Amino acid sequence: MTIAPPVVHTAPPAASSGGRSGSVTWMAWPAVVAFVAFGVVPLIGVLLLSFTSWNRLSQDIPFTGLDSWRTVLSDPQLPHALWVTFLIMALSWLFQTPISLLLGVFIAAQKRYRSVLAVLFFIPLLLSQAAISITYKALLDPNFGLGAGLGFEFLQQDWLGDSTLALCVVVFVVSWQFIPFHTLIYQGGIRQIPASMYEAAQIDGANRVRQFFSITLPQLKYTIITSSTLMVVGSLTFFDLIWVLTAGGPGDATRALAVDMYQRGFKADLMGPASAIAVILVLVGLALALGLRRLGGRDASASQLEGV
């Protein structure tokens, strides 16, 4: 596998359309209406529900003020769930980013066999997280799984019964499914890098590795930030994969914030505290997204390419 992508000729950017932007503003309205209907309105409903003690069974929804918030914020389970959530987030980011970047460089090449591999490679992205979790749960079974079938002793471990191993399995399965998606993002970013930059580097005698670290990586700055934002914010919503795979166990080893919210709301019928956790998830996601955007220091009108 080459470290730096091959030279790809790109068409020159089109001229700015100037004052035409105002005439197409209406095209954004369907998305705005959908966002308000399916994003903002439910969020307001959850926020209001966090000030109640509704048990999901009664028709009455008693207003209890900040009681649910006090219950959640004083519960020692909340810091633990936050720690597990951030641990899964950090480990999956560390695992996915370099692999996605290198695979993106690999499939960015204009070669037919790499296009075929890319199509096969994206299949995990099409599968549901519940199906993936059931499959991995069966494969990792110490008695009837892959280890027992192949006779490999190192695979015959209690992968989902040990706290550390269960967390590692969650991170691996998450990465296995979403690396193709982020590879696609990096592939698109790499193909936008002007070929003239690589041609100039070749004239100067730079090898593939030098081109990767001096051209490819700096030019993918905003792509890395975009991919990282999707990874970080998306990791806050991991529920079905963790629930089917470990149900938050063993003990509370993989009880992330989303799993904690589900257990309070749909197992203990405490919709008030569960809604408070949902609001906390939204606030944490917004803070992380804004922090990463600020880290990028990107001007909305600036070019996506460094020095261009």
Image: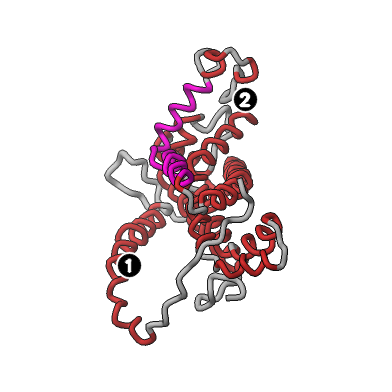
> Could you say where residue 122 lies in the image, as x and y percent from the top left?
44, 43
Q: Which mark is residue 162?
A: 2
Q: Earlier in the sequence, mark 1 or mark 2?
A: 1
Q: Is residue 109 above or below residue 290?
A: above
Give the left or right position of residue 62, taking residue 182 as reference: left
> Could you say where residue 41 lies in the image, as x and y percent from the top left?
33, 60
Give the left or right position of residue 196, taking residue 208 as reference: left
- Quadrant for the N terminus, please: top right
Give SS at disc 2: loop
Residue on which disc 1 sits: 32
Give the left or right position of residue 55, taking residue 237 as reference: left
Q: Residue at x 59, y 49 (%)?
A: 102
> Could you say where residue 250 lies in the image, as x and y percent from the top left?
57, 27
- Residue 31 versus residue 250: which sits nearer the camera? 31
Tell me which secondary structure the magenta stretch mostly adopts.
helix
Quarter-of-image position of residue 125: top left
Say whether residue 83 is magenta.
no
**Residue 102 seen in the figure:** yes
Q: Residue at x 44, y 55 (%)?
A: 65
Task: Look at the numbered discs 1 and 2 and tell me whether their residues touch, using CB distance below 8 Å.
Answer: no
